[in-house]
Amino acid sequence: MQTPSSTQKTTLTSIQYDAGVLGGVLLHPPFLDAIGHPKDVWTIPMITASYDLAACVTALAIIPFTFKIGRRGTILLGNLVAVFGAVVQASSYSVGQLIAGRLLTGFAIGCISSAVPTYLSETGVEIGDRGPANAFNAILLISGVPLAYWVDYGFTKMDNQASWRVPIALQCSFAFFSGGCMWFLPGMFLDILTQR
């Protein structure tokens, strides 16, 4: 049986995978071919920063909506948008489309990162489980970037469009797993009270 803790730990790994996956392909020739070899000094940093900007703004702006749709709903929304963002990024043939995909993924990560820690603490079985669970969460949170870099390293040995599109599309796997499992998990006590 899937538990809230293990499902959301997968979500935490996806946060850092999403953050790190683009870094390994930014200067890869097939990636630069797809986005038209930008010459100015602002394009590549803007592609990268759009994700962080969207995640930061969303994490703050989603707070009032989290009280309306609940933490479970916020996590489900984040996973759904993460799939769309990854698909837009993986199918990109322009800087604008890539930035749009990064903004969508950043929105998703803002939703997820604002709701998962509280959801985990509210669904903890026993108080003594929360400390080790948070330590394990930190390990999984940090493990996403090395995972992304190793996936990038393996795929950039190829010299075709799949060498950067597949690692970016793999972002969907985290969202499918945690969103699919989250669908069957309960909401919080606060959600149940506010629905009455």
Image (cartoon, rainbow, N blue to C red):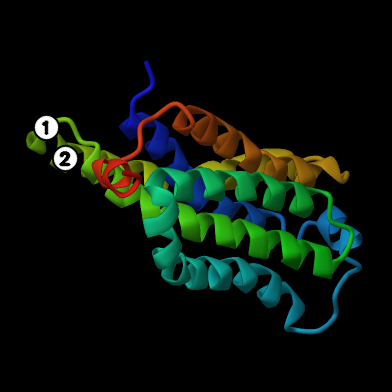
Where residue 5 appears, x then y in whole percent? Answer: 31, 33
The residue that label 2 is drawn on is 130
Give me the C-alpha separation between circle 1 and circle 2: 7 Å
> Is 128 on the left or on the right of 175, as rendered?
left
**Quarter occupied by residue 32:** bottom right
* Residue 126 - label: 1
Secondary structure found at label 1: loop
**Quarter occupied by residue 105:** bottom right
In the rendered image, is residue 58 in sight? yes
- Disc 1 + disc 2, Cβ < 8 Å: yes
Q: Residue at x 25, y 41 (%)?
A: 189
Name the residue at the left extreme.
128
Where residue 15 appears, x then y in whole percent? Answer: 49, 51
In the rendered image, is residue 26 in sight? no
> Is 109 on the left or on the right of 95, as rendered?
left
Name the residue at the top extreme.
1
- Nearest the viewer among 75 and 101 is 75
